Amino acid sequence: MNLKQIARKFKKSDPSNLLKNTIWTILGLGLRIIIKAAYFIIIARLLGVQGYGAFVGIVSLVAVLSPIASLGSGNLLIKHIARDKQALSTSWGNALVVNLIMGTLLGGIIIGLAHTIFPETIPLTLIIYIVVSDLLFSSVLELSSQVFQGDKKMGWTAQLNVNLSLIRLAAALLLGYYYINPSPQQWGLFYFISSFLSATIGVTAVTYYYGYPQVSFRQIRRDLKEGAMFSFGSLAESSNSELDKTMLSNLASLQATGIYATACRLVDVVNVPIFSLVKASYSDFFQKGEHGINHVMQYAKKLIPVSLAYAAIAGIAMFLCAPILPMILGSEFSKAEDAVKWLAIIPILKTLNYFLTNVLTCTDHQKLRTFLQCIAMILNVILNYFLIVRYSWNGAAYSSIITNAFLSVSAYVVILYLAKRERLEKVNAWSQYP
């Protein structure tokens, strides 16, 4: 079979333009990661391991809690648009209203309890800058990109994400230009301004392309229950990814937080192609989910093997390239080499988690996904509490590996059960006909 035949075969089996959307997503996220890596290196070197640890400690907690601010509106936005494009304007407007109201309330609570949550060495102004930036501005930008994602226009999604990273890179360069030894608060102000500009661009793009948003409070009320399930699931998922850094800043030190966060950043980099494929196929998963879990699993089985192969290669590359990291970031980050080696298994586990939990979500089993993720979150918190005190960042790495492995296995077991039950129900339904 020559290349033209392969291309024709793939095109015929890919009516939803998954390949094109995946390429757009990879390009967008790839550029975003490269740009983020550049400003990460700049900020890490400017702030030092302690200053960077303080910054990451706040960002991680806000990332954990941000799903509460959205109440699942982003997932609902993609679902509604994927199944009925006529619902776009209303879904977009509803998502904005929910995010702005809930983000403001949650942000006020976090700021009010700031010195109960964070070490007293972290300034309140830095906390305010990051809370407003991530709970309001970054959330609005994410919703803007999800409008295009639901409509399978991943080129726009990619452009909006790249814009955010470019603006933050410019902010980091300006910070280094104006200040020789900048404080975390000064970076917080630049971070705030860059987030506001990015959100403005996102809203403008959606409004230009699709028109002004509309709001239906009746639809918001109808979506609350399902949105809450999405929200709790995302909360548990973000907790498993981010809460360990916040706990490190409280139970260990800001230096340990900086070391571990650096290794996690590298994991994010190597996961870009996998996350790109997951993001590009998310709308297709919802469409196929209308036909049942077995139908979705057949689709997922086409994507998982190649994704796992990449994840394995990426993990090996992480392990082998770990010694280079301190050369790039400086001697303060020398212990990040060991952290990267410990986390080299995470890309494989994350790949399984992404696809398997999406199978549950897109077949209207979000409650089960949320339940499994909440168990994983509780397990993660308990393990972190005991292991971080004893092993510092190593304990966070152990906890991350155990929690991700648990979620992969449990999700697969649940899917097998649901698929078997669905097949039996179909057999019983057919047996009733003469």
Image (tube, rainbow, N blue to C red):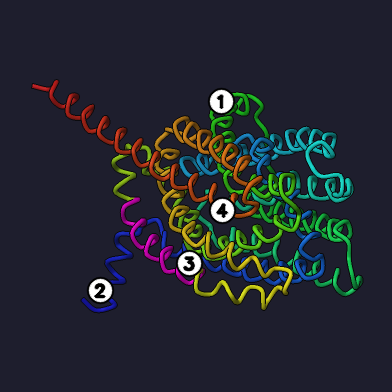
Quick one: which residue is furthest to the left in this view? 434
Q: CA distance from mark 1 to mark 2?
A: 47 Å
Residue 302: give x, y in percent of width and height: 31, 56
The residue labelled by disc 4 is 397
Q: CA distance from mark 1 to mark 4?
A: 34 Å
**Label 3 crowding class (10 Å Cα cut-off): few <14, some 14-19, many 20+?**
many
Label pair 3/1, CB-CB below 8 angstroms: no
Q: Which residues are magenta?
A: 300-318
For residue 373, side relative to residue 432 (left or right): right
Q: CA distance from mark 4 to mark 3?
A: 31 Å
Name the residue nearer the viewer: 428 or 124.
124
Mark 1 vs mark 4: give the one in front: 4
Name the residue nearer the viewer: 337 or 54.
337
Mark 4 vs mark 2: give the one in front: 4
Residue 360: give x, y in percent of width and height: 41, 38
The residue labelled by disc 2 is 5
Q: Is residue 428 visible?
A: yes
The residue labelled by disc 1 is 225
Q: Is residue 345 above or below residue 127?
A: below
Residue at x 67% of width, y 46% of height: 63
Q: Quadrant of the C terminus?
A: top left
Of the residues shown, which amino acid type is indicated by label 2? Gln
Q: Is residue 87 visible?
A: no
